[in-house]
Amino acid sequence: MGFNSTIQKRAADVLFQRRLLAEKRADAVKREVFEKYPRARELDRGISDSGVAAARAVLKGGDVVEEMKKLRDSNLSMQAELKKLLTDNGYPADAFEPHYQCKRCGDTGYYEEQGRTVVCTCLRQTLVQEACAELNRTAPLALSTFESFRLDYYDKQPDPGLRLSPYELMDKIFKFCKGYAQSFTPTSESILMKGGTGLGKTHLSLAIANEVIRRGYGVMYVSAPAIAQQLEKQYFSRSQTDESLADMLTDCDLLIIDDLGTEFRTQFTVSQFYNIFNARMLRHKPVIINTNLNLRELEQAYSERFVSRIIGGSTKLDFIGKDIRVRK
Ligand SMILES: Nc1ncnc2c1ncn2[C@@H]1O[C@H](COP(=O)(O)OP(=O)(O)OP(=O)(O)O)[C@@H](O)[C@H]1O
Ligand SMILES: [Mg+2]
Ligand SMILES: [Zn+2]
């Protein structure tokens, strides 16, 4: 998956800041311990000086082997004493070591494996998050939150034919979406939001996006017409910069496709959507789809296979009520 250099730089910076923070914290603990226990400072200095002493011993000549053994023994006993001092006083034995977020690469983004340098998953994840943030800069994320979602727009009179009122139903949908966002994991279930225009589908899916992004996951929020057009344009111009669009749609932690069914449909776009959804499904990665179409219309537009395979396993939320754009 290719990322442009801006994204690469930002991701590298995120890891650099993590590293710095871990080192600063370790330093702060060290200073605190030195302050309270001067013996710890002596030990720490002694341990780092023993390397220099070893070099001196070699230069001086004489019984180098004997001298080195003495140095090593004294180094080990200083280390043991320091550890004991720390643990006796309620610190972890490795309190002076930086605690990196990623144990595998020490927040450098790379590690060695069988003599090869490997890109760590933490760097890959940061790249996806930065790329998503970049894409979402243009999406109207900020305004639609759970806090600004109001239930009093929905009628309390039971709907004819339904046992519940729009108010009661939307209350359930609202709570479901909030719970979903708050307990989101990259293998959460998929959601299909359907219903008439102006009922809060976009609002609630943006609220989910906000919360899931806040919790540190990579979310892509895209409208079906915009993304269909971009995928097509990219395919026919084979532009380099957009190379990773389909990959990002496939790889992000949560993909939200708004207004499915309003895009200009071609065999190409239908098969692209299918491939992206299918690849995500195979890896248990969730999608939230919003649409005005009902299941039959979806089948007509995208084929039965598409609907049963892609939409079959998702939680279906049916939005009802009167257009809130008009009410507002
Ligand atoms: N329950 C609500 N509380 C506050 N604002 C709402 C609520 N539901 C919708 N809105 C607002 O009303 C407008 C229309 O809602 P929204 O865009 O979410 O509808 P939609 O179901 O996505 O419609 P469409 O199918 O046409 O895309 C938006 O500005 C949205 O913020
Ligand atoms: Mg909408
Ligand atoms: Zn890592």
Image (tube, rainbow, N blue to C red):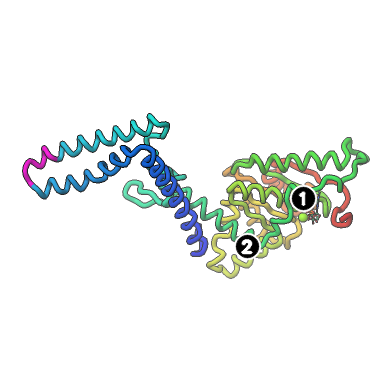
How far across and down, in percent of the image, does residue 255 sit? 64, 51
Q: Which of the 4 image quadrants contains residue 159? A: top right
Which residue occupies the foreground of this view, 26 or 327?
A: 26
Q: How many marks?
A: 2
The range drawn in magenta is 61-67
Quadrant of residue 284 in the image? top right
Side of 130 where 83 appears, left or right: left
Looking at the rendered structure, which numbered label has been put on residue 148?
1
Where does the image place residue 257, in percent across and percent down from the top left?
69, 54
For label 2, count other residues whose C-alpha is less than 10 Å away and answer few (under 14), some (14-19) or many (20+).
some
Q: Which mark is residue 231?
A: 2
Asked whether, in this view, residue 104 is left or right of residue 254, the answer is left
Front-lying residue, 24 or 298: 24
The type of residue carrying mark 1 is Ser
Image coordinates for residue 19, horizontal then vertical, percent = 43, 50
Q: Which residue is most to the left?
A: 62
In the image, what residue occupies the spot 35% across and 46% down? 113
The image quadrant of residue 65 is top left
Name the secondary structure under disc 1.
loop
